[in-house]
Structures are given as C-alpha cells and as structure tokens.
Image (cartoon, rainbow, N blue to C red):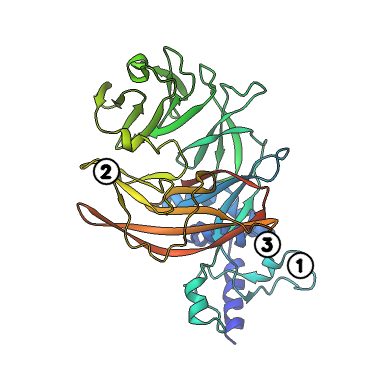
Amino acid sequence: MKNDQECSLVNMITHLPDDLLLNCLARVSRLYYPILSLVSKRLRSLIASLELYQTRTLLRHSESCLYLCLRFSSSSNPRWFTLCRRPSKIPNPNINPNSSPNPNTQWFTPCFKPHRSLKNQTKKEEKRSSNYLMVSVPTRNFSVESLPNHAVIGSNIYSIGIDSKLCSVKVFFLDCRSYTWHEAPSMRMKRIWPHMSVIDGKIYVVEQWNVPPSNSIEIYDPKTQIWDYLPCPIAEILGQKFMIKSLAIDGKLYLCGDKCMVYKPMENKWDVVLGYETLFLWTQFKFSCVINNVLYSSKLSRVISWYDSDERIWRYLKGLEELPKLPRSFSRLRLVNYGGKIAVLWEKSGVFSRKKMIWCAVIAVERRSGQEIYGIIEWCDVVLTVPKSCCVLESIAVTI
C-alpha cells in the first residue's frame, strides 16, 4: 500500500507541466539527478537543461558536487564520475522490470521526501550503508587530454591540455551543468609542470618544474577572459633549487623554494615568510585540502592532520577513531574540500584481486578550541568498484 502511494506521488509529479516540474527539480539535491535522469526522456531533458540551473540560481539553491576523473587504461580517454544517491526500492510504474536493460531504471529514488531505510534493513546495516555511489557522466564536444591538476570557478572545471610534446598553452573548461567541454583563451607561455590555484575568482598558474627566469606566473580572469603575467622574485625564491611548491590559502599565494614568499593580491605585493617549511613539505600532493583557511593533510601517516598556523606545527584531527586505516601511498589517497567538509577518497584492493574499490568518507570539521579541531564522520562506504588497472587522475568538488 505504501509503495502504491509513493508511486502515485511520483506519477503525479512527473506529469506536471514543464515550468512546475523545473521548479520542483530545482529544489531537489543534485545528488538525485543522475538517477532521476534514467526515469524518462522528459526528465532527462529537463535535468540537462540550462533552464533548470537558472531556476536553481533564482531559488539560491546551490550545493557542492563531488567529481572523480578516472583513466581505465593507458590508451583510453579520461572519464568523469559524480557522487549521487543510490536508487531505493520504490517500483517505477512506467518501467517493465523484465524489459529494462538498466536495473537502476526499475526503481525511483526518494528525492521528494526524506530518505527512509528499507524495512528489512537492520540497524547495523543502516549505520554502515551510506546510500551513495559514483556514476559516470557523459561529456560532450570532445574529450580533453589534460594535466592532472584542475581549478574550479563557479560551475566550471578548468584544465590545461597536453599536446604531443607534453607542454601546452591550451586551456579547456568543463561546464558541469551541461557536461560540455569548451576551449578557453590560451596561456601566453607553454607549461611543463604547472599548478593551478584560485584566488578571488582568478586562476593563478605557477610553473613548478624548470622554472624560467621571468614571467613564471600567469593569471586568468574568466570575466574578462584575459591572461596576464604576474612579476615574481623567482631568483630569490629558488636559490639553489629548481622546483617551486605553491599553495593558495587565506586569499594569498604562497611559493616555496629556498625561501618562502607570499603574494598578497589586495596589496599587489610580495613578502618573505618564515617558518612555513613544514607546511610546504606536503602541499604538492593530492592528499591535502584547505577548509576555512586551515590546511588538512594525511602526511603519509595514515591519519589526517591539520596545520596550526599560529604554532606552525601539525596536529592530529581528533574524533576519527572509527575511520578505516588510510593507505600510505599518496597516489591512492585524495582529500577534497566538499562544501566545507573533508571528502576523503582512497583505493583499496586485495593482493590477488582484479578489482579495486574506491572508498569515500565525508567528515565535518569542528574547532572546539584554539588547538583542537574534531572530525565528525558523516558516512563512509565504497562508492565505486573498478578494474585494478584503473587510475584516479583527479578528485574535485564544484559548487553548482
């Protein structure tokens, strides 16, 4: 009886006029969109329309969306995945389960009401299950071969392309509303090992390897679509070293070589900073993220730490006793600022298994005193199973 009532409710909603249905969909979390797009061609078309995102903007309903970029083999193009809710066991009256090629289309997802657990699910299973998974999203226009460093501005993911010589001036961006690739204006100088940072809605590109003597930093303003050089005291930073580490935090750009320097865009000024060597030791890896101007990192220690900028030391993030042991290898671990929370993604596989599981844990952070930050694990589960040869290229969060 309850399933019949739920099916009737969904039927009623899906038969609304387009403008009313768009208004309903705009109030639904984007976590449900991949599953809802499987229900019917009409819903798929509305979910892919820019009108839906215009309505979401008018309603001020934006949220952080988590993405993974994977490569399944050395000869394959990168594929993008996004986090969504698992479909629940509410039968879809419009689908014949015997003829549906995709089992997910046989079920509705409870997007128009609070999520409920299955009747037969035990309390232990309910606590363990996250009800989240990663699903593939098809991208349009062309597939971009890019360096494993991206920057996010608005709903766009920016990437620097790779050409045959592994250095390029081309820049592309993926519009995560329509999943369409576009080409942005090219940089002025080719990059071999660039790092992209975002400060105040602008992209700062720093060449971190074989740095040239001048014009080493470029800034891109997506509003004007213009690239410009940022003069930099590169010789003073590098000294005897030939590699620069960079980090954007608190609206400033930090660079570290023999010396640590900070650029303050509001003052258009460079300053020397002391005592930041321990901070920069780990910032070049993907197992670091910044939330509310605090840097979090696993530091190859299988636990998560945060950098106390007042004392200039690393401190353990407390409250994570139930978090599974993280891998030591930085290549199998990612930390992402996911809407002000830490999304921890890591790979796990058996020695003789041909598959590997991608785990995800979402952790809220709470400062309880000047020297104590606690993590609260909201959920933790396997979100994707892939062949062991699959490589995670990027993990990133976009606000849409």
Residue type at tag 2: Ile
Which callout, 3 or 1, points to the residue nearer the camera? 1
Assign a secondary structure to mark 3: loop
Q: Residues within 10 Å of mark 2 (few under 14, many from 20)?
A: some
Q: Is residue 300 above or below residue 380?
A: above
Which callout, 2 or 1, points to the residue nearer the camera? 2
Work out which residue is located at the far front of the displayed protein and give it: 351
* Residue at mark 2: 313
The residues tagged by marks 2 and 1 sit, at their Cα atoms, a distance apart of 56 Å
Assign a secondary structure to mark 2: strand
Work out which residue is located at the far bottom of the displayed protein and give it: 1
* Residue at mark 1: 100
Residue type at tag 1: Ser
Assign a secondary structure to mark 1: loop
* Residue at mark 3: 40
Looking at the image, which residue is at 52% across and 82% down? Answer: 122
Q: Quadrant of residue 262?
A: top left
Residue 400 visible in this rendered orientation of the protein: no
Q: Is residue 272 above or below residue 67?
A: above
Q: Is residue 92 above or below residue 24?
A: below
Q: Is residue 315 left or right of residue 93?
A: left
Residue 89 position within the rendered picture, expressed as x and y whole percent measured from the top left: 62, 75
Q: Is residue 9 left or right of residue 340?
A: right
The residues tagged by marks 3 and 1 sit, at their Cα atoms, a distance apart of 12 Å
Looking at the image, which residue is at 53% across and 21% down? Answer: 191
Q: Residues within 10 Å of mark 1 (few under 14, many from 20)?
A: few
Residue 95 position within the rendered picture, expressed as x and y whole percent measured from the top left: 72, 70
